[in-house]
Image (cartoon, rainbow, N blue to C red):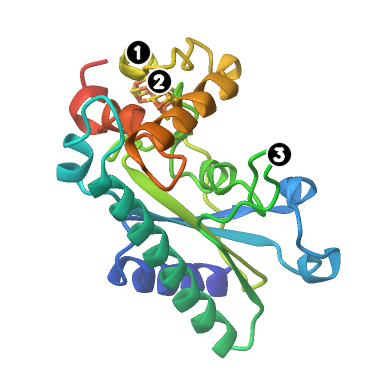
Amino acid sequence: MQDKEKNYSQLKKLALASGACLFGVADIEPLKKDFIDISPQSLKDLKYGISLAFRLSDKIIEDIQDHPTHLYLHHYRQVNYLLDRLALKISSFIQNQGWQSLPIPASQTIDWEMQKGHLSHKKIAVEAGLGWRGRNNLLVNPQFGSRIRLVSILTNLPLRVDKRMERDCGNCFRCVEACPAGAIKERREDFDWLACFEKLRWFRKKYNIAHYICGICIKACPGNIHLTKL
Ligand code: SF4
Ligand code: SF4
């Protein structure tokens, strides 16, 4: 137990000093069945998922009006690179102590049809207590809202596990009103993936944005500012 706590504090300190704004740990056993393109052999001993978040620039997000900007496109890419480097740093630190560690790419699509990566960083973040799944289908943290991006590292290093945050969007509907595709509904389960994706495809073509991104529901969800008004 002492080792778990010590390892947790050591990694958290390193992650925050390296630029992460949030750190948490989840038990990944119940989530493994949904991981793709990672061999069972590689996953066998990995029991913990470390979830890290990096805070997006408010200025860049606030600059988005009714479509994704090139400033946001650049930011999105740079934050993904930074998250990958962060995961690599933590992973290497764990490995050098004699434990196993698997950094998962921050943004790499494996299954194009289903638009899936190796695993859901959001699911790990929820289990690691970083926030809840909002109506906009993104992770929402009380302090930063949806203005964060995530990465995960899987490991067998003994770590203390965090608790889920028992909160939800409550009476807030800002992103529902803001979404230009009408994809965000009252219940997250009703989120219209297809309508969202069609809008991203349209943005990509119309504004020559080399990614399927939008940013409008991220802008609508800034954290503290409006959550305190619920
Ligand atoms: S803007 Fe409000 S409703 Fe939408 S995800 Fe954020 S907190 Fe939830
Ligand atoms: S990314 Fe854009 S289109 Fe998709 S749900 Fe958010 S606001 Fe709507």
The percent position of residue 58, horizontal first and vertical second, equals: 18, 43
Label 1 SS: loop
The residue located at (33%, 61%) in the rendering is 78
User: Which of label 1 and label 3 is nearer to you?
Assistant: 3
Relative to residue 213, is residue 17 depicted above or below? below
Q: Residues within 10 Å of mark 2 (few under 14, many from 20)?
A: some
The disc at residue 113 is 3
Q: Depth check: 192 or 132 in front?
A: 192
Report the quarter where the C terminus lies.
Answer: top left
The answer to whether marks 1 and 3 mark residues whose Cβ atoms lie closer than 8 Å is no
Label 3 SS: loop
Instruction: Please tell me how many numbered marks the rendered image carries.
Output: 3
Relative to residue 133, is residue 125 depicted above or below? below
Type of the residue with mark 2: Cys
Q: Kindly report the distance in space between the C-alpha atoms of the residues bearing marks 3 and 2.
A: 29 Å
Q: In screen coordinates, is 188 left or right of 226?
A: right
Type of the residue with mark 1: Phe
User: Which of label 1 and label 2 is nearer to you?
Assistant: 1
The percent position of residue 69, horizontal first and vertical second, equals: 26, 40
Label 2 SS: loop
Q: Is residue 61 visible?
A: yes
Which residue carries the number 2 mark?
169
Ligand 1 shows up in the quarter that is top left
Which residue carries the number 1 mark?
173
Q: Earlier in the sequence, mark 1 or mark 3?
A: 3
Q: Kindly report the distance in space between the C-alpha atoms of the residues bearing marks 1 and 3.
A: 30 Å
Q: Is label 1's Cβ within 8 Å of ligand 1?
A: yes
The percent position of residue 96, horizontal first and vertical second, equals: 55, 89
The answer to whether marks 1 and 2 mark residues whose Cβ atoms lie closer than 8 Å is yes
User: Which of label 3 and label 2 is nearer to you?
Assistant: 3
Report the quarter where the N terminus lies.
Answer: bottom right
